Each structure stands twice: as C-alpha cells, then as structure tokens.
Amino acid sequence: MRPFGSSPDLSAIKASYMVSLKDELGTLEGLQSEVDFGFAEPRTYKELRRLAHVHAGNAATFGFSALGEAARAVDVHLNDANNAPDLLPSLVADWRGQLQIACQNY
C-alpha cells in the first residue's frame, strides 16, 4: 500500500486501462458488425453509447485525445434522436480505428 499523500502509480493504472481497451476493441468490433450488417437492436445502440461515453471520458486522461474525440462523436450522435442514422457506421468505424491505433501504440 502506498503511503498517504503519495502519488498513485499511474503506470499501473494506464496498464490496466490498456488491457481494458484491448478487451473493449473486441466488443466494439461485434457491435460495429451488428450496425454494418443491419442486425442492430436497441441493446446494440445502448451498449455502443455506454462504451463511447466511457471512452470519451477516459481516453484523454491517458493521452489518447483522438480516441476520446471519436468516441465522443458517437456518444453525441447516439444521444440525439434527430441525427441521421446513416452517419453512425462511419462514426463507429472512425472510433474503432482510433481504438486500434491506441492499442497498437502501447
């Protein structure tokens, strides 16, 4: 246990974050397939939005601003019912690309 008042071990926290990103990449790929092939259900969009919201909030903390921005675009898009649904596949593809880059660069 670290002494009270000392800085947390950010490298361990980032390593844990990176493991979670690699796991979530598989989840995102599955969700993206559902959207791309027309099999998306309400739970698909709910899970996409949840995951995008988490990435949008956490990515910049660990130095992945492009990932955060791509995830935020999906989160905002899914939060607004008036957005064109045909834009979602390209937004998810961009987010997935940024997630792949983050996983490769660590």
Image: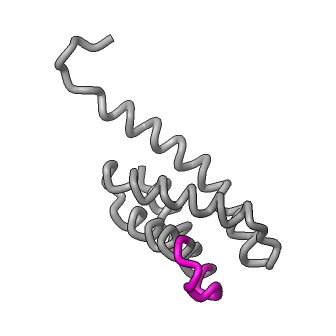
Residue 84 percent across, percent down from the top left: 59, 88
**Does 26 sit left or right of 10 as displayed?**
right
Q: Residue at image x 57%, y 56%?
A: 50
Left or right, residue 17 beside residue 43? left
In the picture, the quarter occupied by the N terminus is top left
Farthest residue in the front direction?
A: 81
- Residue at image coords 38%, 39%: 14
Tell me where residue 13 appears, x and y as whole percent. Answer: 38, 34
Judge whether 40 appears above or below 12 on screen: below
Image quarter for residue 34?
bottom right
Q: Is residue 86 covered in magenta?
A: yes
Q: Residue 10, percent across and down?
A: 30, 34
Q: Is residue 52 above or below residue 24?
A: below
Q: Residue at x 39, y 54 (%)?
A: 57
- The scheme the figure's colours follow is one colour
Asked which quadrant contains residue 78, the reply is bottom right
Residue drawn at (39%, 69%) of the image: 69
* Drawn side of residue 33 relative to residue 88, left or right: right
Work out whether residue 30 or residue 80 is closer to the camera in this orientation and state it. Answer: 80
Relative to 2, is 43 above or below?
below
Residue 80: x and y in percent read: 53, 77
Q: Which residues are magenta?
A: 79-88
